[in-house]
Image (cartoon, helix red, strand yellow):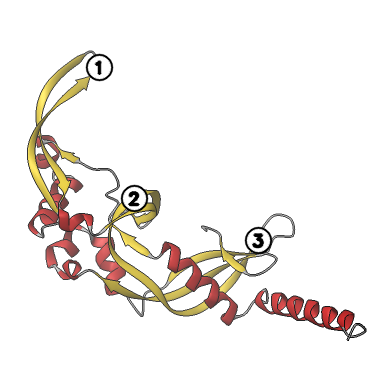
């Protein structure tokens, strides 16, 4: 038995190296594993409502600003509740009291608020990351469509992956007004199974990993 131990150790080591090598190959299967890991952590689709309470001024209401349009819809759906509050408004050397509509999460709304670093869609199609957000849906992988290598510094290997996705959404996302005042949310929800999203991946010693992780 003692003479067999070195052989067994070498065989085990070769098996581990072979497994790592297989996971670092650039193929659909490995990118699917990477995409699934990425969406498990970052697949929450959120509304970019990170800090509460949210105050809406009369000027914002008159101008039809984003929060002035969105918050009453969230209130109608029971996700937020409003009150009137006094705040101090400062303008250069002057300050004055003003009344605002103050919106806070309701008990139902808190069920959809995730307290962790979240990436949310902005109205221009870009995204931002903040701590915590009111989230409407969860994306999971449908399929990896294709990928393209991108230039990178040094010996680092990177690819951009195009993929389609599935959506598990809250019931209130079906509301027509929600989809009207959150157009990017509606676009992503309605694009499940057909709309292609992109994510950048880099090669690590053991696997292909999303750059954002």
Say whether marks 3 and 2 touch (CB < 8 Å): no
**Residue 141 percent across, percent down from the top left:** 43, 76
**Label ID, residue 132:** 2
* Earlier sequence position, callout 3 versus callout 2: 2
- The residue indicated by pointer 3 is 151
Q: Answer above or below: position of 114 versus 162.
A: above
**Residue 50 percent across, percent down from the top left:** 30, 47
* Earlier sequence position, callout 3 versus callout 1: 1
Which residue is most to the top? Answer: 93
Q: Secondary structure at mark 1?
A: loop
Which corner quadrant of the image does residue 195 belong to? bottom left
**Label ID, residue 28:** none
Q: Residue at x 35, y 55 (%)?
A: 120
- The residue indicated by pointer 1 is 92
Which residue is most to the right? Answer: 3
Q: Residue at x 30, y 51 (%)?
A: 48
Q: Secondary structure at mark 3?
A: loop
Mark 2 against mark 1, which lies toward the viewer? 2
Q: Secondary structure at mark 2?
A: strand
Of residues 204 and 9, the one nearer the viewer is 9
């Amino acid at each position: 038995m003692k003479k067999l131990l070195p052989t067994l150790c070498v065989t085990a080591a070769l098996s581990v190296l072979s497994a790592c090598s297989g996971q670092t190959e650039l193929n659909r299967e490995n990118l699917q594993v990477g995409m699934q890991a990425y969406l498990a952590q970052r697949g929450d689709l959120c509304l970019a409502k990170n800090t509460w309470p949210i105050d809406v001024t009369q000027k914002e209401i008159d101008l039809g600003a984003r929060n002035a349009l969105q918050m009453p819809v969230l209130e109608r759906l029971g996700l937020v509740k409003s009150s009137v509050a006094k705040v101090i408004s400062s303008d250069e050397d002057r300050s004055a009291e003003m009344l605002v509509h103050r919106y806070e999460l309701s008990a139902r709304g808190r069920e959809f608020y995730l307290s962790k670093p979240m990436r949310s869609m902005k109205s221009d199609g870009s995204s931002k990351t903040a701590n915590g957000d009111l989230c409407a849906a969860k994306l999971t992988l449908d399929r990896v469509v294709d990928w393209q290598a991108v230039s990178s510094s040094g010996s680092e290997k990177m690819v951009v992956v195009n993929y389609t996705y599935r959506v598990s959404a809250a019931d209130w996302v079906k509301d027509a007004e929600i989809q009207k005042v959150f157009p990017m949310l509606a676009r992503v929800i309605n694009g499940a199974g057909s709309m292609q999203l992109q994510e950048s991946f880099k090669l690590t010693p053991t696997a292909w990993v999303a750059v954002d992780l």
